[in-house]
Image (spheres, helix red, strand yellow):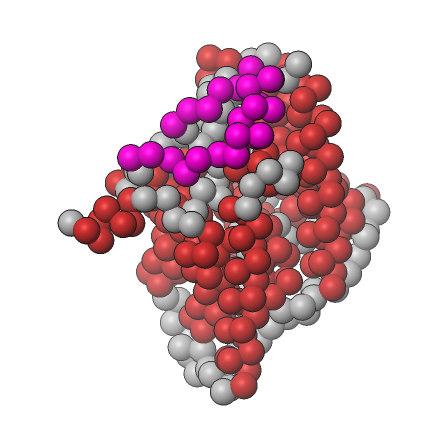
């Protein structure tokens, strides 16, 4: 199986440009969304999700294979209570920093060095969760 | 060049949204990869400082694709934010501008409010709570919830997984409460 790292770099780049140009990396835009005062972010979600769903439907319907000739597999997410506790905690962080993980990278790339602080804090948060995982309710 | 001028303008939701949605099938077809950015944070932890933490001891070399995807996001930020910097930003709703100006945050040609996200102003407890505390919760919360806005919000909802719907609903409820009640307290 080929690694295709260049392809993932390219897809990430397109994703990054889109998040940037669609203003989905803006702290201001997130406050607007959470205050129901603008449509940009809702419009993005309401078109991105059906586009993805329709594409998957087409892939399944015509049994389109991956570049390696494998059938497309979609792993099921299994519910645990971490989705609830983690969801609440992430929501707080999202509204405060105005960024979910993807936009943090994009902000840094756009030249905002201060977003490195957000990234390091997020890495620290991930590490602490990983460390505490066996002791946390799930 | 006309196409350059067109790309340079802010992209409306009906352009950005479908392009973001297309990432899901493209990653699946590229090699059965599921869209999700928060896993890159775990990946960096596993690569750089796994310590003695079982959750960080996995074969990260098999997941290296997501590091390249994250590098692409950095590059995309540079291309979209620097090379394709728009002449004028997409306007923000007047209601949001008004509310934010009440907390001393002025609109500007940037994607982060310089009054908070600024090396010189970082070291007040309120700003540290927003940037460092908020960043910490992004990392802690997404891993606890098993995904973020891309993994649950786009991929999970598009593949109709109800656990993702639970997670996304809580992302939003908690974000709405934070933006409307907690943030104003911190910016007083």
Q: Is residue B176 left or right of residue A70?
A: right
B113 drawn magenta: no
The residue at 51%/13% (across/down) is B121
- The relative height of residue B122 versus residue B180 in the rendered view (above or below) is above
- Give the image quarter of residue A75: bottom right
- The relative height of residue B188 versus residue B63 in the rendered view (above or below) is above
Most extreme residue toward the right is A137
Q: Is residue B11 left or right of residue A45?
A: left
Q: Is residue B174 visible?
A: yes
- The relative height of residue B185 versus residue A125 in the rendered view (above or below) is above
Query: Residue A111 location in percent, x, y?
Result: 36, 32
Query: Residue B158 location in percent, x, y?
Result: 60, 66
B90 drawn magenta: yes
- Comparing B43 with A32, the one in front is A32
Most extreme residue toward the left is B1
The residue at 54%/86% (across/down) is A61
Query: Residue B98 location in percent, x, y?
Result: 56, 23
Query: Residue B157 location in percent, x, y?
Result: 64, 62
The residue at 74%/64% (across/down) is B162
Q: Is residue A44 left or right of residue B56?
A: left
- Comparing B58 with A21, the one in front is A21
* Magenta-tinted stretch: B87-109
Main secondary structure of the magenta stretch: loop
């Amino acid at each position: 199986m080929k690694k295709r790292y260049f392809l993932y770099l390219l897809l990430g780049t397109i994703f990054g440009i889109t998040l940037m140009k669609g203003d989905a990396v803006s702290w201001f835009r997130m406050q607007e969304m959470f205050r129901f005062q603008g449509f940009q972010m809702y419009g993005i979600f309401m078109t991105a999700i059906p586009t993805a769903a329709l594409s998957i439907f087409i892939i399944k319907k015509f049994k389109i294979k991956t570049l390696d000739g494998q059938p497309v597999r979609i792993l099921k997410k299994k519910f645990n209570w971490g989705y609830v506790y983690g969801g609440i905690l992430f929501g707080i962080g999202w509204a405060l920093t105005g960024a979910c993980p993807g936009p943090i990278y994009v902000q840094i790339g756009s030249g905002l060095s201060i977003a490195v602080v957000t990234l390091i804090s997020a890495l620290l948060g991930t590490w602490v969760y990983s460390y505490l995982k066996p002791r946390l309710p799930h | 060049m006309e196409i350059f001028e067109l790309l340079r303008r802010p992209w409306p939701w009906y352009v950005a949204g479908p392009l973001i949605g297309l990432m899901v099938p493209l990653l699946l077809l590229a090699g059965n990869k599921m869209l999700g950015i928060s896993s890159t944070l775990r990946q960096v932890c596993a690569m750089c400082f796994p310590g003695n933490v079982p959750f960080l001891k996995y074969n990260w070399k098999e997941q290296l694709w997501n590091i390249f995807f994250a590098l692409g996001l950095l590059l995309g930020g540079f291309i979209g934010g620097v090379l394709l910097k728009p002449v004028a930003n997409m306007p923000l709703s007047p209601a949001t501008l008004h509310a934010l100006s009440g907390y001393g945050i002025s609109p500007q040609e940037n994607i982060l409010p310089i009054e908070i996200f600024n090396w010189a102003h970082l070291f007040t407890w309120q700003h540290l709570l927003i940037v460092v505390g908020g960043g910490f919760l992004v990392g802690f919360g997404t891993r606890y919830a098993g995904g973020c806005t891309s993994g649950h919000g786009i991929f999970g909802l598009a593949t109709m997984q109800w656990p993702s719907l639970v997670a996304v609903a809580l992302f939003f409820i908690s974000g709405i409460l934070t933006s409307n009640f907690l943030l104003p307290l911190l910016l007083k």
